[in-house]
Image (cartoon, grey):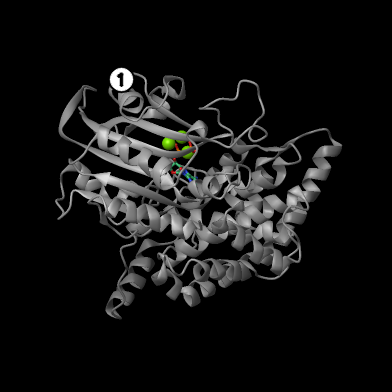
Amino acid sequence: MTGSQIRQKFLDYFAARGHTIVSSSSLVPHNDPTLLFTNAGMNQFKDCFLGAEKRSYVRAVSSQKCVRAGGKHNDLENVGRTARHHTFFEMLGNFSFGDYFKPEAIAFAWEFLTGELQLDTDRLYVTVYTDDDEAADIWHKQEGVPKERIFRFGEKDNFWSMGDTGPCGPCSEIFWDNGPGTGCGSPDCAVGCDCDRYMEIWNNVFMQFDRQPDGTLVPLPKPAVDTGMGLERITTVMQGVTSNYDTDLLRDVIRNIEQLSGKRYGDREDDDVSMRVLADHSRATAYLIADGVLPSNEGRGYVLRRIMRRAMRHAKMLGFEDPILYRTAVFVLEFMAEAYPEEAERRDFVARVVQNEEHRFIQTLGNGLRILQDEVAKLKADGRSRIPGETVFKLYDTYGFPVDLTADIVEKDGFSLDEEGFESCMEQQRAKAREHWKGSGEEAISAVYKQLVDAGIRSRFSGYQTLEDQGDVL
Ligand code: ATP
Ligand code: MG
Ligand code: MG
Ligand code: MG
């Protein structure tokens, strides 16, 4: 079964059980200024869960484009290193807005996996929240899952909340055993281990309480269900592979990179990492730009820029000297056109934006890398392993190297960054800018504004682009 067929099967399965198929919303959340990017299927339904919005349906199903880079859910550092994390991925989800609850949700999930997809129950495990006996009982008594395959985890993994107050509740997750020989190999490796062996495939959230400002949990009159399953992960399971990058969803993107670079995936570990990063980041770049995010120096645009520059650096490591990301990004849009036709129509725009950014950065990337290499060599000779803050700052300020890019480059040599030193350089620069400002004569500026206004030029509100949760964005 292809990834596309699995996506369709999921939608069809839930549609046949009274769920309305809702298309993916944009990666730029339209109704939530606290969120950097759409990072789960439930985002577009937030107000339905809160009861603030009523729709014509109480059951929904979707396949949602998600990005987890920057902000609270940041998987950027994981990409290329784990077999299961992406910056851009698709989340399949079924939702109940005060309609069905735990027994039905668990029955649907189990039937879909073991009935529709025919997964081997000996390789599946489930988890419930510490004191959620109700869910544990449903798994065991209703679905016949043996007790030893049901794990109980605490707040961190198995309790979900929208914020400090408001809807929240226990979760129940489903894991797939990729088998011996995968993951960390530790004798203690078990469900819950943060490696690739026991792979979380599906999270079922039971919104059951309304948390009050004093912390008490008041039961919701109409509890709700929110679920999320990574399409790439379930495709890994279905295609009998152990890495998302070996599924047809990602393999063709890598194949395209193989063709362009003349290198073969699987030949050299370093190249493989670069190919995975480039494949993943091409997807994120393509869909973020198609959804209207542009590379810039702040907010969402800066997260995109960091993703793109990281992709460019890995492209360079693969031997590309000329712009290539615009081609790999367009390939993604065309390859996934059936599922996302509107985005595919924006391919020319995406290509232009990416190529422009590549032209801006390629030259300085080479120059910056040389500076960094010299610095690393010098420090190594001195027996040191920390890049001074001034160097990190110079690379950032003059060469456009996002700090995490610099960290990523030197990590392999066992180097870390003097982040405090970097911060103080930043502070000095800010202070200088303020100093400058004082003497620059605000009246003159007002006059310029007046001229612009007189000429009919207005400023545009850009809060949605720049305001939100900037996470670790500098
Ligand atoms: P993990 O613990 O593996 O990082 P998570 O608990 O952060 O996953 P959830 O927030 O529960 O993930 O999201 C629901 C589902 O979305 C997960 O069970 C998984 O299948 C998928 N998923 C989450 N993050 C990613 C990612 N970065 N790349 C691909 N799929 C993901
Ligand atoms: Mg995670
Ligand atoms: Mg998890
Ligand atoms: Mg989870």
- In which of the image's four quarters is ligand 4 placed? top left
Q: Is residue 197 left or right of residue 7?
A: right
Query: 205 or 182: nearer the eye?
Result: 182
Mark 1 packing: few (<14 Cα in 10 Å), some, or many (20+)? few
Instruction: Identify the element where label 1 is drawn.
Output: helix
Q: Residue furthest bottom?
A: 455
Please state if 433 lies on the left or on the right of 60 as rendered: right
Residue 11 occupies which quadrant of the picture? Answer: bottom left
Q: Quadrant of residue 85?
A: top right
Residue lying farthest to the right in this orientation: 381
Does residue 100 sit above or below 35 in this rendering? above
The answer as to whether callout 1 falls within 8 Å of ligand 4 is no
217 up-or-down from 377: above or below: above
Q: Mark 1 belongs to which amino acid?
A: Asp
Is residue 2 visible in the rendered image? The answer is yes
Residue visible at 43% across and 34% down in the picture = 174
Question: In percent of the image, x 39 and y 38: which residue is there?
Answer: 203
